Amino acid sequence: MTRILLNGFQIGNLSGTGRYTEELIKALINIPEELQILLPSSRPLSVSSDKLSILPLPNNRYITRFIQFFLLKKYFKEFQPDIVHYPATYGYKLGNVPHITTVHDLAFLENPHWFPIHYQWFYKKRVEETIKFSHRIITDSFFSAKEIQKHYSINKDKIDVIYLGISDFFKPQTKEQIETIKNKYNLPQKYILYAGTLEPRKNIPSLIEAWSNIANKIDNDLVIIGRTGWKTDTIEQSINKSKYKERIHRLGYISDEDLSVIISGADIFIYLSFYEGFGLPPLEAMSCGTPVIASKCGSLHEILGDKAVLVDPYNIQHIAEAIYYLCEDSTKRQELSQNGIVYTNNFTWQKTAQKTLEIYKKCLDPY
């Protein structure tokens, strides 16, 4: 039996790394292999299995961040895993077994001004050390693989690109479900939608400005969903500046089950990020049958291809024209909807887990 110490520190984090960690584990334990996943975590997983052992971490994330090395070292000595996997970009060397790290993106190096100072310092130091001791690096896209090679000068043969999956609840919903959820959250009948963390690289002020420039020509309000990250003052300023701010609807964190219905009810999902290592939200929207307008920056062109309307996220006029064009063209929306549903069937967590398991086996071959 292969014992994998998989750091679950990010479980419960309402971001892409949290979803990746949880979905990867759930898919791994469904593979018919002799595995034992040793999961240090402060949160229970939504599933249970004989293959899964939860090793407790403190409930306070800040305390855990400071002492996790000592806890991981303790668990390593106690359970003697065959492999250590860090699923959230950084980790610590624990012993003489293969260490695998999933590096999702290098936004903290490419654009450090997007992040708080302590975040920049921690990740710059920690990730460089992690990449040095890791036997293999998993990353989410070929774009990110090139970024890793550029910044750390490591052999490309050490890097494995494994695309992420889409969770099962992201699927088209019925008209009845959509009307119920619109009433629950007091949403307008017609809207375009952004869903994701509220942070600088997501480029939400440009979305607000572009939509405001054509709001008088379309019936669609703007709905913004997501947990507050950092440096969000410009978002509030952009909303207050808009002549149509009464048509901008702000919702905080929404459960995945409700979110999939809200996405299904949108005429357009829009995602203008300056930088992504993968880009789950627009794929999740496609899986719900919602047409997508997305930035062509970072990994998004690679991941979305011609199944979305891609725009220059720095060009407000270009964004506004794309919104207006798609709001007015129901035939194009239907085409994007149908093509997106078919396309996203290629992205499953089962595939992600199976390819990750192959990396585990590759690492264990010499041992």
Image (cartoon, rainbow, N blue to C red):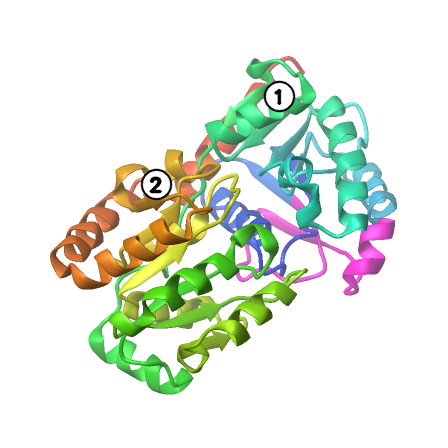
What's the residue type where badge 1 is placed? Lys
Q: Would you place residue 26 above or below residue 296 in this image?
A: below
The kind of secondary structure element at disc 2 is helix
Quarter of the image for residue 169 reads bottom left
Q: Position of residue 149 (x, y in %)?
A: 61, 20
222 and 8: which one is in front? 222
Residue 292 spot, x, y in % from top left: 31, 53
In this view, the residue in front, 316 or 81, is: 316
Amino acid type at mark 2? Leu
The answer, for residue 287, to whether it is visible in the render is no
Look at the image and say whether residue 50 sits in the magenta stretch: yes
Q: Earlier in the sequence, mark 1 or mark 2?
A: 1
Mark 1 Cα within 10 Å, few/some/many (few <14, many 20+)? few
Q: What residue is pinned by disc 1?
A: 150
Vertical comparison of 237 with 37: above or below: below
Could you tell me which residue is drawn at 57 percent across and 30 percent down? 138
Residue 195 percent across, percent down from the top left? 45, 62
What residue appears at the point 76 percent right and 43 percent down from the top-left corner? Answer: 120
Residue 304 is marked as 2
In the image, the segment drawn in magenta is 38-67
